Image (cartoon, rainbow, N blue to C red):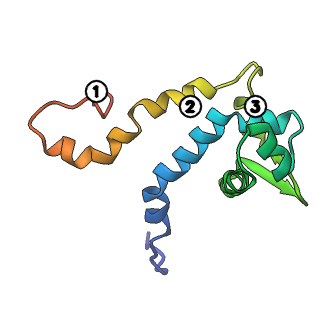
Amino acid sequence: MEKKKGKVDTIRLQNLVYGHKTAGVLMAAVELDLFSKVSGGASTIEDIAKALKISRLNAHRLVVACTGMGLLTKDGTNYFNAPDAERFLVKGKRNYAGPWMLMQKRDFERWRDLADLLRSSKPTSVLGGY
């Protein structure tokens, strides 16, 4: 089977290298309890800022990032949780997975230094035992 020739770009690679940013946004949103507040009725930037006790500018930044990642949807000036965020990231819901998301924060910084850890002659556990 012959491969189709097309334009090769860096989009996939950019998405991979920016992974730490999307993880950071998700962890911040969970830590601040954004999805529970949106589920409870905080749907505008102003409402969200007040509910999270952060500035309007920072609420806007967080909400725009979460919307871009597909965690929130927007209708006019109102924001709503995406179905998976509503199911798994709202405190009190049966399938709440917030603590699991935040558990990943433990070794988040160590991955930045993975190349150095791999060059080291000392065994490393950053790869989770692999």
Q: Residue at x 67, y 51 (%)?
A: 62
N-terminal of the pair, mark 2 or mark 1, is 2
Residue 116 appears in the rendering: yes
Identify the residue position indicated by label 2 in the image.
101
Image location (x, y in percent) of residue 85: 72, 38
Mark 2 vs mark 3: give the one in front: 2
Q: Is residue 81 visible?
A: no
User: Mark 1 touching mark 3, by CB under 8 A?
Assistant: no
Given this view, does label 2 or label 1 mark the residue nearer the observer?
Answer: 2
Q: Which mark is residue 87?
A: 3
Please, what is the three-letter code of the amino acid marked with disc 1? Gly
Quick one: quadrant of the N terminus? bottom left
Q: Position of residue 55 (x, y in %)?
A: 72, 50
Give the class, few, some or many, for how many residues have Cα within 10 Å of label 3's Cα (few <14, many ≥20).
some
Q: Is residue 18 above or below residue 83?
A: below
Tell me the amino acid under the disc marked 3.
Arg
Q: Tell me the quarter of the image containing the C terminus.
A: top left
Res 129 label: 1
Q: Looking at numbered disc 2 in the image, what kind of residue is underneath it?
A: Met
Q: Is residue 87 left or right of residue 11?
A: right
Q: Quadrant of residue 110?
A: top left
For residue 23, side relative to residue 77 (left or right): left
